[in-house]
Image: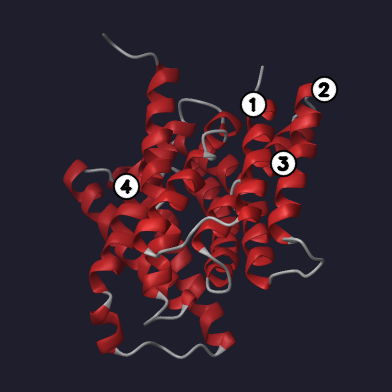
Amino acid sequence: MKLSRSKQGELMVVAAVFIWSFFPIINIFIYQQISPIFTLILGNLFACLFFLTLMIVRKKFYELKNKKGLVNIATATFFLSIMWMFVFSGIKHTTAGNASIILLMEIFFSFLYFGIWHKEKFSLSHITGVIIMAIGAIIILFPGEIKLNLGDLLVLVGAFFAPLANYFQQKSRKEISAETLLFVRYLISFPFILIVTFFLKEQAPSLIAITNVLPLLLINGIAMFGISKLLWIESIHRISVTKAASFGPFAPAFTLIFAYFLLNEIPTFWQLSGFIPILIGAILITKK
């Protein structure tokens, strides 16, 4: 039986979310050898090479002549580069579970962003969902005391830029294929991040340090930034960004489970207390 376009998009986003749930865990291991900014640089490099290979195999270089598609992905890349610098820096100062849960605020920002931009009417269900999600985020950001964790705040700021990037990625996908889109995205972001690294005077990792975590760096570049993002682009090509983002609550659930077995991280009372309202709020926001 042939699946509808909507069902295809839903299955793709679920697969993308499952793969992505390993992201905070893998990067915590990598950070033991390499700084967040260089982890981002190497992730971009391996992802760029992965999509270059796909373009060669599928003979997609003619798409590089599509100016409209390139302008949209260049704009998306600008917002994504800012987002990832905040997220990668934040993960270093928080837990894998916290980072995964806070990234769910992308749903919150997507709703506000697309609602305001497209001037959609806010139903009582949607408004309630926004408020509940905000409460969940506050619980995680301030676990029992008014003391802000820098890592959580940085991840939250990063999540703010996600809807902007996804909007322009969705527009670009209408013009060019996902592999071309992602190749250009990583190709553009690579020198941009290098320039930022230069001004921040970040010390480059040693060859030994890179070698020690090379398998994880390859997984980061090919699986996280490669396959996961390919599935995500194809999903938002078939369903709305807000609907795709609504599947986000599955990620922290998987992350908390995997973090327990791989990092011995036991979900805290505050993590669970914050995750539950964010999950409920996400359901209300995406409810028709």
Task: Inspect the image, locate mark 3, and give the three-letter code of the amino acid beneath it.
Answer: Met
Marks 2 and 4 in Cβ contact (< 8 Å): no
Q: In terms of depth relative to the viewer, which is nearer, 176 or 279?
A: 279
Is 130 located above or below residue 72 in the figure? above
Real-space Cα separation, disc 3 to disc 4, in angstroms: 29 Å
At mark 2, the secondary structure is helix
Please name the residue that numbered disc 2 is placed on.
124
* Closer to viewer: mark 3 or mark 4: 3
Real-space Cα separation, disc 2 to disc 1, in angstroms: 12 Å
At mark 1, the secondary structure is loop
At mark 4, the secondary structure is helix
Q: In terms of depth relative to the viewer, which is nearer, 102 or 175?
A: 102
Please name the residue that numbered disc 4 is placed on.
227
Marks 2 and 1 in Cβ contact (< 8 Å): no
Real-space Cα separation, disc 3 to disc 2, in angstroms: 14 Å
At mark 3, the secondary structure is helix
Pointer 2 or 4: first along the chain: 2
What number is the disc on residue 286?
1
